[in-house]
Amino acid sequence: MDNFEPLDPLLHSQLRLAVMSLLISLEDAEFTFIKEKTQATAGNLSVQLDKLEQAGYISISKSFKGKRPLTTCKITTTGIKAFEAYVTALKKYLP
Amino acid sequence: MDNFEPLDPLLHSQLRLAVMSLLISLEDAEFTFIKEKTQATAGNLSVQLDKLEQAGYISISKSFKGKRPLTTCKITTTGIKAFEAYVTALKKYLP
DNA sequence: TAAATTAGTTTATATTATAAACTAATTTAT
DNA sequence: ATAAATTAGTTTATAATATAAACTAATTTA
């Protein structure tokens, strides 16, 4: 009965959790789409996406949509596993 | 469909959430009991309990057990409501 | 061609979490 | 008796985090 196992600090953050929650059920998602859905500021989102990418939880690819920059995010296998482990751990804190 | 409603920052913290999770199913709990169950350091626990008390989520009473100080914590009605609202909001982030 | 918008990034600041250091008393060992 | 260790915490300093504000660079619209 190992109560309260540690929660992955990378996922125990409102914005990063929302991002992962979106990405887990989508093939991929654009920066602006994630920004709208999460109501985050662009600056905050940019920083948090970087952290998720550096952890290997998502991959970020940069291209162009017409002439404007386009940032696309996709959850990785590592990210899926981390998210699932986080959810399992978190549930032990809930009724 | 108001996805991703904000998570009460007072509860979206590993240690404070663990404390509330314990207290919600107990009449009350001693400082040392909470410390053991959560594996927190005394200093960190002391600070986080203060925050929960200042928010009105728990009440803290100080007395003596024999000759040693005894700190006892109890969740309040406000705390129960906040915890329940947090859980409801959090679930929208989970699969 | 000036102003506004889009799509972001970088940087500075405020907040938070945490550990280390400390207080104050008690118990145990010498 | 007294020194060392333990208990039960609090206070304070520091490290980590989240967030917003300021910025870049280009595009579109008036």
Image (cartoon, coloured by chain):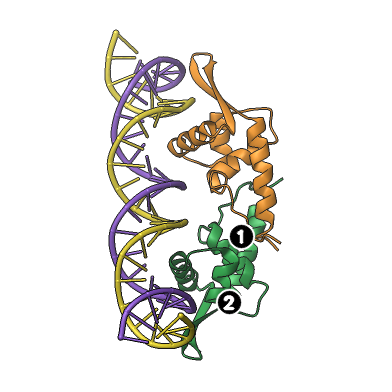
Chain colours: A green, B orange, C purple, D yellow
Comparing A27 with A67, the one in front is A67
The residues tagged by marks 2 and 1 sit, at their Cα atoms, a distance apart of 15 Å
Residue D4 x, y percent position in the rendering: 32, 27
Residue B83 x, y percent position in the rendering: 65, 42
Q: Quadrant of residue B33?
A: top right
- The local crowd at label 1, few if under 14, some if 14 to 19, many if 20 or more residues have their Cα within 10 Å, is many
From this viewpoint, which residue is outermost toward the bottom?
A66
Vertical placement of residue B3 versus D28, above or below:
above
Residue type at mark 1 is Tyr
**SS class, disc 2:** loop
Instruction: Report whether D10 appears left or right of A26.
Output: left
Vertical placement of residue C23 versus A14, above or below:
above
- The local crowd at label 2, few if under 14, some if 14 to 19, many if 20 or more residues have their Cα within 10 Å, is some
Mark 2–mark 1 CB contact (< 8 Å): no
Rendered residue at 65%/65% (across/down): A84
Rendered residue at 59%/53% (across/down): B6
Comparing B87 with B2, the one in front is B2
Visible residue check, residue A93: no
> Given the image, what chain letter belongs to the residue carrying mark 1?
A
Residue B74 x, y percent position in the rendering: 62, 28
Instruction: Report whether A65 appears left or right of A81.
Output: left
| Residue at mark 1 | A86
Residue A87 x, y percent position in the rendering: 65, 59
> Given the image, what chain letter belongs to the residue carrying mark 2?
A
Going from N to C along the chain, the mark reached first, 2 or 1, is: 2
**SS class, disc 1:** helix
| Residue at mark 2 | A76
Rendered residue at 56%/49% (across/down): B12
Rendered residue at 57%/47% (across/down): B8
Vertical placement of residue A35 versus B82, above or below:
below
Visible residue check, residue B17: yes
Vertical placement of residue C5 versus A15, above or below:
below
